């Protein structure tokens, strides 16, 4: 910027985007001084480099505002994880289904994992039926994004919120003045913005830590 530019000549662009042409660096600096603007390299790798006359302080301020607005409006995708056992107790199932419903209403995806142990591995249909039951009971909030699939000792299904549910969650978050409150970020284990890593059930789901048993008996 300004005297830091080392090229002998530059392709100059005016403050309104008009093409001035190729001029010596000294001439470009003089033009910038005449209109009380900065000479800023916008394409330093070009030959000759492209420079523009602008108010650099104002440019940085407006860029920061745009970046902040983009972060505020960004739709986050968080994947939560819910673990169940194929022979889960009815009460535990209802509790865990409640967590799945809460996650979907918040606009998050849910990775549902059925964990098989011992002889249960020979009865994959138990897990499949449980996942299908869960799918049928949350149809008003979400849909199956990834169908049930056996993965070693586990069977995994991914649920995603319907577009309307996601939009409602985003609107509710925006009305609170931020992309996601700190508690929710801690719950997801991911920073604001972008696709987040899979997050296990949190204290909000009645757990005491990352090693807590979420399988249900």
Image: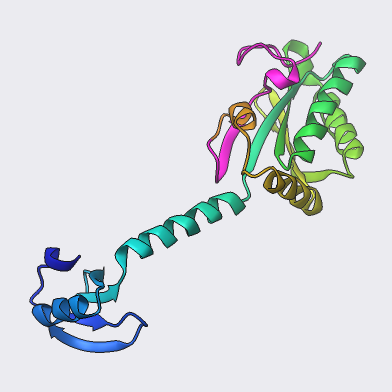
Q: Residue at x 65, y 36 (%)?
A: 79
Q: Residue 99 location in percent, x, y? A: 79, 27
Q: Residue 206 location in percent, x, y? A: 74, 15
Q: Residue at x 24, y 76 (%)?
A: 50
Which of the two residues, 144 or 12, is positioned nearer the viewer here?
A: 12
Examine the rendering and report whether any part of residue 111 can be seen.
Answer: yes
Please identify the quarter of the rendering in which residue 41 is found: bottom left
Q: Quadrant of the C terminus?
A: top right
Question: Going by the image, does 135 lie left or right of 20?
Answer: right
Question: Going by the image, does 85 lie left or right of 44?
Answer: right
Q: Above or below — where is 90 with respect to 108? A: above
Which of the two residues, 62 or 130, is positioned nearer the viewer here?
A: 62
Say whether residue 95 is magenta.
no
Question: Going by the image, does 81 lie left or right of 28?
Answer: right
Q: Above or below — where is 50 with respect to 199? A: below
- Count of marks overlaid on the render: 0
Q: Above or below — where is 52 with respect to 122? A: below
Please tell me whether the stretch drawn in magenta is mainly helix, strand or loop: loop
Q: Residue 78 location in percent, x, y? A: 64, 39
Q: Quadrant of the N terminus?
A: bottom left
Which residues are drawn in magenta?
191-217
Examine the rendering and report whether any part of residue 47 can be seen.
Answer: no
Q: Residue 37 location in percent, x, y? A: 26, 73
Say whether residue 204 is magenta.
yes
Colouring scheme, one of rainbow, by chain, secondary structure, one colour: rainbow
Q: Residue at x 82, y 44 (%)?
A: 142
Which of the two residues, 147 or 34, is positioned nearer the viewer here?
A: 34
Please identify the quarter of the rendering in which residue 141 is found: top right
């Amino acid at each position: 910027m300004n005297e830091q530019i080392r090229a002998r000549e530059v392709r100059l662009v005016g403050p309104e985007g008009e093409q001035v042409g190729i001029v010596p660096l000294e001439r470009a600096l003089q033009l910038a001084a005449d209109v009380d603007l900065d000479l800023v390299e916008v394409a330093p790798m070009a030959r000759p480099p492209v420079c523009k006359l602008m108010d650099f302080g104002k440019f940085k301020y407006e860029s920061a505002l745009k970046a902040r607005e983009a972060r505020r409006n960004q739709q986050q995708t968080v994947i939560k994880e819910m673990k169940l056992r194929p022979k889960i107790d009815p009460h535990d199932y209802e509790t865990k289904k409640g967590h799945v419903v809460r996650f979907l209403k918040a606009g998050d995806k849910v990775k549902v994992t059925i964990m098989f142990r011992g002889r249960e591995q020979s009865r994959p249909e138990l897990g499949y039926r449980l996942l299908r039951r869960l799918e049928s009971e949350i149809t008003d909030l979400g849909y199956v994004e990834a169908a049930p699939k056996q993965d070693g000792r586990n069977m995994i299904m991914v649920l995603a919120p319907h577009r309307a549910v996601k939009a409602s969650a985003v609107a509710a978050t925006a009305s609170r003045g931020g992309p996601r409150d700190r508690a929710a970020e801690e719950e997801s284990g991911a920073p604001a913005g972008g696709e987040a890593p899979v997050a296990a059930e949190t204290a909000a789901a009645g757990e005491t830590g990352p090693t807590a048993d979420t399988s249900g008996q």
